[in-house]
Image: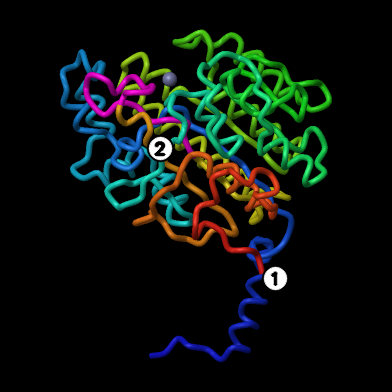
């Protein structure tokens, strides 16, 4: 039996579908929005393979797993495919099939940082400017003079201050986001949100974020940061948003592999909630590209998985997922070489309909095959 229909019938069916589901129509027209989510220091091993046997089977002193039976019950499955789906079900069953994911080296898809530092600020700087900068050598809270993709997007699109937003659990993100103070809305780990942009709910989350204790002093609760970002999206409808969370890095530095895994499952739930929120409201429904990535990898061995930095092999390995109305449903990329962290900037601009070369001709180009212009 043939399912082929004459072109006119197919066109009529498509029109009917568009009338019935406004989102289907929105997917092919309308102003574009971009949300970048960064998860700090998430290794390719967990992202592509779930619970890593190299760490899980190491002595407890290396993995830091408190109760092996509990952790294996939660996250161990026989195959890497089953393990990653158990750990991050929304990411693997919903996001990846609808978009493109790069970084699985077993499939010939490698994504690396180009900076030679292999820790946070140099990585975020590379994403925000499209290329590494040799003077960025510490996580100190200082601004560098390099214009960022967020500054460029605001100017090129003529956006209001509140329409470009950076919200994160760590103050370093606020500095990496812009070459100057006040270029757009920026929110550090313990900052309040100004009254005109806030809501009682946001104020409550800000207050809680200052009180909830963290393992390390310099970061705040990702769940609360996410809630602030979600309410900010609802109230202020930014065109370009960067949400930066990172307890993955905190638990790893604390050498608690069990809590790293538990956290990744929580982060997957935040991504699910974010995507559902975006698809449930205007102007985001069907018009928003979500980019999810990490600033650096970590060591590959039981001895050094908890750390990262120049010289710790594995710290350079990262991954990037792109999902949205203009990205073909490719799933896991195969045999895509030479993708570097700086691609984030050009990819954001491309999905906003902007010319990335006008921002920085030396920026890493967008990922080939990740974008089809709307018709
Ligand atoms: Zn770190």
Q: Is residue 197 above or below residue 109?
A: above
Secondary structure beneath label 2: strand
Question: Looking at the rendering, in which quadrant would you find the C terminus?
Answer: bottom right
Q: How many marks?
A: 2
| Magenta segment boundaries in residue numbering | 293-312
Q: Position of residue 342 (x, y in %)?
A: 53, 40
Q: Is residue 310 magenta?
A: yes
The image quadrant in which ligand 1 is located = top left
Q: Position of residue 292 (x, y in %)?
A: 51, 41
Left or right, 121 with respect to 160, comes to: left
Q: Is residue 347 above or below residue 302?
A: below
What main secondary structure does the magenta stretch of the protein show? Answer: loop
Query: What residue sits right under mark 2 in the picture?
Result: 318
Q: Residue at x 66, y 76 (%)?
A: 16
Secondary structure beneath label 1: helix
Q: Position of residue 91 (x, y in %)?
A: 43, 45
Q: Is mark 1 within 8 Å of ligand 1?
A: no
Question: Looking at the rendering, in which quadrant would you find the N terminus?
Answer: bottom left
- Rendered image: mark on residue 19: 1
């Amino acid at each position: 039996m043939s399912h082929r229909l004459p072109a006119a019938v197919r066109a009529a069916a498509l029109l009917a579908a568009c009338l019935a589901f406004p989102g289907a129509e929105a997917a092919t027209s309308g102003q574009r929005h971009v949300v970048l989510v960064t998860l700090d220091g998430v290794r390719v091993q967990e992202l592509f393979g779930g619970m890593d046997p190299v760490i899980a089977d190491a002595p407890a002193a290396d993995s830091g797993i408190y109760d092996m039976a509990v952790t294996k019950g939660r996250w161990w499955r026989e195959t890497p495919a089953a393990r990653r789906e158990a750990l991050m079900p929304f990411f693997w069953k919903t996001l990846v099939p609808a978009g493109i994911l790069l970084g699985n080296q077993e499939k010939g898809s490698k994504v690396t940082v180009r900076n030679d530092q292999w820790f946070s600020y140099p990585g975020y700087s590379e994403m925000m400017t499209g290329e590494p900068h040799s003077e960025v050598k510490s996580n100190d809270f200082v601004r560098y003079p390099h214009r960022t993709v967020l500054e460029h997007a605001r100017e090129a699109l003529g956006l209001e201050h509140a329409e470009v937003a950076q919200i994160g659990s760590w103050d370093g993100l606020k500095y990496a986001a812009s070459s100057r103070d006040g270029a757009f809305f920026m929110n550090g780990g313990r900052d309040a949100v100004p009254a005109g942009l806030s809501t009682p709910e946001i104020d409550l989350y800000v207050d809680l974020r200052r009180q909830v204790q963290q393992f390390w002093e310099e970061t705040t609760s990702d769940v609360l940061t996410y809630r602030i970002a979600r309410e900010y999206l609802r109230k202020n409808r930014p065109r370009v948003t960067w949400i930066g969370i990172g307890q993955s890095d905190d638990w790893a530095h604390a050498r608690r592999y069990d809590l790293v895994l538990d956290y990744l499952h929580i982060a997957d739930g935040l991504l699910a909630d974010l995507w559902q929120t975006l698809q449930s409201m205007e102007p985001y429904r069907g018009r928003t590209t979500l980019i999810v990535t990490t600033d650096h990898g970590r060591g590959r061995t039981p001895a050094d998985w908890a750390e990262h930095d120049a010289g710790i092999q594995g710290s350079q390995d990262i991954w990037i997922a792109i999902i949205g109305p203009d990205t073909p449903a490719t799933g896991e990329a195969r045999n895509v070489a030479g993708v570097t962290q700086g691609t984030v900037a050009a990819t954001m601009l491309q999905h906003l309909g902007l010319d990335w070369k006008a921002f920085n001709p030396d920026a890493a180009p967008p990922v080939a095959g990740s974008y089809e212009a709307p018709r």
